[in-house]
Image (tube, helix red, strand yellow):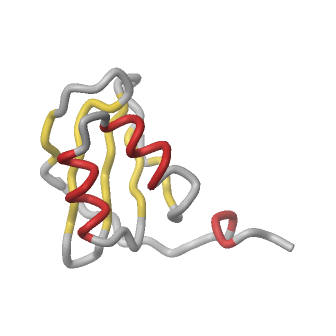
Amino acid sequence: MKSALNHKIKIKVVINMKRDSIKSSNLNSIGYDLSSRTLEIEFNNGAIYLYFSVPQTIYNNLMRASSHGRYFNRNIKGKYKYKKIE
């Protein structure tokens, strides 16, 4: 049985999502589109990922976390469908 995270999904890529730069040892910038509930994260290695159906509260908590990377690892990674776009 495949997990829900492994299913192929159709996505509507949000073009030119505004991302805010953050200070983190792992994450470089974060953006969020409320209408599609899409979280966009650029990592320090240049990779950019979209995470789908992310509640606004998760985005808000990520932005005000004392450690963005720790919050990402505990509350986002492995919990939402995602797509690498770069």
- Expressed as whole percent of the image width and height from the top left, the position of residue 24 reads 28, 26
In the rendered view, tell whether residue 69 sits above or below residue 60: above
Q: Quadrant of residue 44?
A: top left
What x and y, as percent, mark residue 47? 41, 34
Q: Report the quarter where the N terminus lies.
A: bottom right
Q: Position of residue 46 (x, y in %)?
A: 36, 27
Q: Is residue 47 above or below residue 84?
A: above
Q: Is residue 54 above or below residue 21?
A: below
What residue lies at 24% left-to-right and 69% top-to-bottom? Answer: 56
Q: Residue furthest right?
A: 1
What's the residue at 38%, 35% (across, down)? 69
| Quadrant of the frame with the C terminus | top left
Q: Which residue occupies the foreground of this view, 11 or 56? A: 56
80 vs 7, left or right, is left
Tell me if 21 is positioned left or right of 59 in this view. left
Q: How many marks?
A: 0
Please name the residue shown 31% across and 62% down the image: 58
Percent across and percent down for residue 49 are 41, 47
Q: Which residue corresponds to the image point at 34% horizontal and 21% vertical from the top-left?
A: 25
Q: Quadrant of residue 50?
A: bottom left
Which residue occupies the foreground of this view, 84 or 73? Answer: 73
Q: Farthest residue in the front direction?
A: 66
